[in-house]
Image (spheres, rainbow, N blue to C red):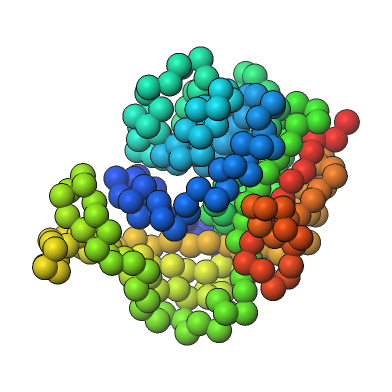
Amino acid sequence: MTKSSILKPANYDQFAAIYDVDMGTNIGDADISFYVERVSTLAPVLELGCGTGRVMEALVAKGIRTVGIDLSQEMLARALRRLESFDRDFFSLVHADMTRFRLQEKGRAAICAFSTYSKLLSQDEQKQFFQTVALNLERGAVLILDMFQQTEAFLAKKDGERVLDYEKRWFPEKICFLTRHKRIWKEVRPNINRIVLEYDFETQGGEVLERLEIEDYTRHSSRAEIEKLLYESGFVDVQVFGGYQGQPYSIQGGQMIFEAYIGP
């Protein structure tokens, strides 16, 4: 067992209830049109780590049949509620590890959005992920993988510094406001960052009703590392973009969007 395999990313069942409120304005919808444009004629589409169904909802609304795969049952339950007004012929949800699953019908496209890939904390897990995705895609199918890239500004931040991400974001489920602080420790192990998220559920006047602390880990990868794994897993014609408008990749940028195809 490798050291990195002992570390585990956060259990998303812990904060499925707050996920949409927590991440909504952080993610936005900038990526949606990018995905829709590239997979509009390629159903079925597999979404790897579909969470509460933000991307799935946009795809299904366009009539694109989509299969969502996620390890968190609570996230999947919320995705189902989000999608319940749509025809069930256009979506399905699968409770599975995205590094180890097998579908009866192969996909013609796959999406791994919002740095979900960074939750794979070892090279073995990353390799297994690409091999599994390749097995579940038809020849010629496309994989789109969105991954963060560490910038100079990020690397310059002081380890463990408590930073306010946002405050008093309305949380209707508990009829209160949500405030989040974050602390990051870089390279706690090679390529691994530790993240502690602190959530305060507050009244309008700032009284803290409840506090939730979640520990998470992410693994950062270079462009070369990901490209190597893609090619080794049978993908070809790899392109890398620096943003959702198809901008050229830059080593100074904070984003890498990979687009690769299953070879013949």
Which image quadrant: the N terminus? Answer: bottom right
Residue at 73%, 70% in the rendered image: 251
**Left or right relative to 192: residue 173:** left
Q: Nearer the viewer, residue 117 or 132?
A: 117
The image quadrant of residue 203 is: bottom left
The image quadrant of residue 22 is: bottom left
Image position, residue 16 (x, y; %): 34, 45
Image position, residue 77 (x, y; %): 35, 32
Image position, residue 229 (x, y; %): 76, 51
| Residue 259 visible in image | yes
**Left or right relative to 205: residue 149:** right
Which image quadrant: the C terminus? Answer: top right
Residue at 79%, 38% in the rendered image: 261
Image position, residue 66 (x, y; %): 56, 27
**Left or right relative to 65: residue 234:** right
Residue at 72%, 53% in the rendered image: 246
Q: Nearer the viewer, residue 181 or 132?
A: 181
How many marks overall? 0
Residue at 36%, 78% in the rendered image: 162
Q: Nearer the viewer, residue 191 or 25?
A: 25
| Residue 231 versus residue 108 in the image, above or below | below
| Residue 221 versus residue 155 in the image, above or below | above
| Residue 232 visible in image | no
**Left or right relative to 84: residue 229:** right
